[in-house]
Image: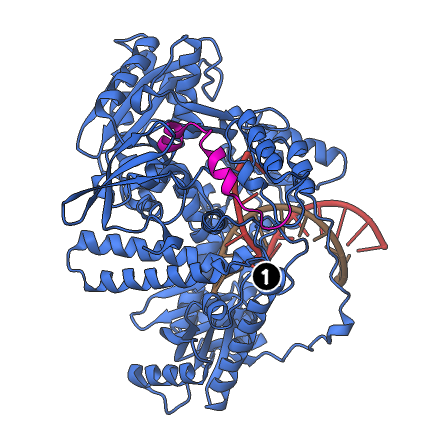
Chain colours: A blue, B red, C brown
Amino acid sequence: MNPLLYGHNLEERIVAVQQIDDGTMRLHFRGKDGLSSRDERFYPFFYLTDGRYLDDFERKRWVKKLEGHLSYQYLCAFEEWPAMWDAVRHVLETHNRESLTKADSYADLDTLYLNTDPVTQFLMQTGRTLFKGMTFEELHRIQLDIETYTSPPHRFSNPSRPGDRIILIALSDNLGWSHVIDGKKHSEKEMLAELAKILSEKDPDVIEGHNVIGFDLSYILKRAELNELTLPLGRGKALPKVYEGRTPYGEIPFETTAIEIPGRQIIDTLLLVQGYDSVKRAMESHSLKYAAKYFGLTSPDRTYIEGDKISWHWDHDPEPLKAYALDDVNEVRLLSEHLSETPFYLTRIVPGNYGHVARMGSAAKIESLMVREYIRLKHSLPHPQEGAQTSGGYTNVFQVGVLGPIIHADIESLYPSIMVTKEIAPASDTNKVFLSLLKELTATRLEAKRTARRLKDPVKKSRQEAMQSSLKILINSFYGYLGYNRALFNDYKAADAVTQTGQQMLKQMIDHVEKRGGKVVEVDTDGVFFVPPEDVEGEERELAFVQELSDVMPEGITVALDGRYRKMMSYKKKNYALLTYDERIRVKGSSLISRSMERFARTYIHSCIDYLLNNDIEAIHKLYGEHREAIQGHKLAVAEFARVETLRDSLEQYEQQVATGKRNRSAAYEVALASGKPYRVGDRVAYYITGSDPNARSFDNCKSAEEWDPNFPDENVPYYLRRLDEYSEKFTDFFQPQDFRAIFSAEELFSFDPRGIVPLVTPVPAEPSESPQDSPPRQFGIWIDA
DNA sequence: AGCTGTGGCAGGGAGG
DNA sequence: CCTCCCTGCCAC
C-alpha cells in the first residue's frame, strides 16, 4: 500500500472496531480472500480543522511564536481548549525551550494525541474508514425532508416564532422504504421522538436532504431544544453536535451552522448542486425542483406546492402535502445518486469523512493529503507565502469571421504535465510530497480509466468513470493550489513557472501549425483552433497531423485531437461558436451566451449564429424584422424581456452603501426595495424597463416582472429596440458595412436581396507587445491573516 | 464563513 | 462623447 494514498487499499475491509484501554484502536479487517485477519493500529489521522477552536488572537500569537515551520495546525486539531493547551505545554516542556522552530520531532505529540476521546475520533472518521472497500450501492442512505408551518404574514418559517413548527417529516431510503410522520396525528414532540426511533432502528450510514444542514436539521434541533427533548440521532444514541458559526453581524444563524451526527454522514444535495454548478455554470437556480428537472430526474406525476401555500394547505387541504413531501425525498435520493458518488469514492483517498469530503474544496483536499503525509513523517508544516501570482494562460484571436474546416487540438492535462516533467513543486515542500502525490494520483486515475474501458457491467463501469473523473478534478487543482494565498504549501514563483511554460508550449504549437501551412484562428491556454493545411483532409489525416504536433512537443507532453468541426464563428477571445459535423451548434463565451441577458436576446443571438454558420443570410434579416415587430407590437411575454439578477447583498447593506456613495444604484435592488417584500441574500429578482426613453437610466425606470400586465403592457419599447440593435451589432465584423445595414434593417422582405453576401474573414493585427520595463511593478498588498 | 488560479467581455453608472 | 471603476458571468 502506498502510504501517500493511505486508505485506498481495496484489498482490505474493516469489519469491526474495538477500543483498547490505552486509546489504541483494534481494527478487524477481512481480506479479499474472505479470511479474517486482525490488526492493531493506532488511529493514524485526526480531524484537521482550520483552527476554528482557536480564536484569532491566540492563533496569531502562536503563529508568531512558532516562526518558520510551524505546528499550529497540528495543535489546532484538538477539539477542546484544555486538550490543546496540554499539548502545547507538554511539547514545550519536553523540548525544554520557549518555542518550537524547525522540524521538531512530533514523537511526543503521539502520546498527547491519546488525550482526545478515541471513540469520538473514530465516529468522526467512519466515513473514511468503514466505507473503505464499500461500494456506493452498499451504503444505507436515508432521505429527510420536513414541512413547516409559517404564521402569516411571514414568508419563511422560523423555529423560534410562536405558532411556527414542524408539521410533516418525510423519510425514504435507497432500499425502497418511505414514511411520513404526520403532524395531524402526533404532537411535535412525538414526531421528533418518532424520528429518533426510526433512525435508531433503520441505522442508516448517511442522511441526505436538500439544504438539510441549513434548514431541516437546524430546524429539527431548534424545535427539539424548545420542546426540551434530547434527540439521539447518532450511532450508539450519540447526540448531534452543532457548531454555531460566528457571524460578525449575528444574523441568519441557519447559514453558518455546521452539524455533525456521530456515526452518520450528512449529505446536503444543495451543496453538491452548488459545487457542480460552480464548475459548469449552466443552472438557473439551485433549488431541488430545478436541479431535478435539470438532470432529468423528475417523475411526470409529481406534486408541486409553492412554498408560501404550505401553511394554507395544512389548514385546509393537508393530503397533497404528504405526496409533495414524499416526491421531494424521492428527488433528493435520485439527485444524490447522481452527484455524491464522486465525493464518496474520494473518501478512500482524502482524509476526512464522507460528509466532510463532500463539502471540501479542491485546495482543502490537496492540503489535507499534504498535511497527513507530513504528520506521518513527523515533520513540521510551513507557513503560507506572502505575495501573489503574476501570470496566467495565453489567450489570443488571430482571425475573426466564419472559417472551416476546423481542428481543435489541445495539450492533455497541460499544467499537471508541466509540473511533473519540469519537476515544479512548492519550495517549502522539503519532503517532496507534492510531486509524489501528483504522480500517484495520476497513475491511480489512469488505472481507473483503463479499468472503466475494460469493464462491461454498466454499474461497475460508471463507478470507475466516477472515480477517474473525480481524480481528474483533483489533479487539475494542484496548479491552483500553488497560487492560493491561504495554502500552507503555496509558491507563487512555482505557479508562475507553470503558466510561463504553458505559454511557451502553446506558442510552440501555434508556430508549428503555421509553419505547416495551417491557419490558426483562436487559442486559449492549452488548445488551438485552426484550419488545417490543404493536404490534411479527412479525419484520418487530421489525426496524423495532430500526432505530428504532439511529436514536436517536449517529452511528456501530449497533444490530442479534442474536436473537429465543419465551421467556426470566431468573434473575440474566449467567444466563439462551432458547427459540428452532425449539424449541432456550440456557443461559447459570456458575450454570446450569458444568463445576465434577456431571454429573447439569448435565443436571438443563438439563431443568428445558426443562420450565419449555415449561410442563410435571408433568415437573419427575417429574424431581425420579426423581433422588431414583436417588440413594437408588445408580443413578447415578460419572461422574454425581463432580466433576472441575484441579490448578493442585503437590502439594508445596499441602501447604506448607496447613501455613503460607495456604490451606484442598481435596478434589481430598487425593484426589491419597492416591492416591500422581505428579500434575502441569494434571492433572484426579475425586472423590466419602463417608460419611453431609449436611454433611460434603468434604476429609476424599472418594475418587477410580476407587475407586468399583458393587458396593459408598459415595457419601454424604444429601449428594447435599442437592446436588439446592440445585440445585432455583435455581427458587425462578419459583413461588409452596406451588407450589415441591409441585413439588420426593418425594410420589407421582398426588397432584401441576400445574393452575393458572404461572411467575412478578417485577420486580427498583432497587439503591440509591451516591453517589460514599461509596465509598472506589481504592487502587493500587506498580508493579513484574517 | 469559507474560499484553487488568471484572462476576458460587457453593461451600468459617475464624472470629466 | 469618453474614460474609469465595479460587478457579473464565462473560458480554460
Q: Residue drawn at (55%, 68%), measured in percent from left and top?
A: A498
Which contiguous range is marked in magenta? A101-123
Q: Position of residue A533 (x, y in %)?
A: 42, 88
Amino acid type, label 1? Ala
Q: State yes or no: residue A235 in magenta.
A: no
Q: Quadrant of residue A176?
A: top left
Q: Residue drawn at (33%, 21%), measured in percent from left and top?
A: A233
Q: Position of residue A510 (x, y in %)?
A: 51, 81
- Residue closest to the eye, A8 or A166: A8
How many marks are shown on the rendered structure? Answer: 1
Circle 1 residue: A427
Left-right relation of A326 to A119: left
Q: Residues within 10 Å of mark 1 (few under 14, many from 20)?
A: some
Quadrant placement of the N terminus of chain A: bottom left
Quadrant placement of the C terminus of chain A: top right
Q: Position of residue A691 (x, y in %)?
A: 62, 41
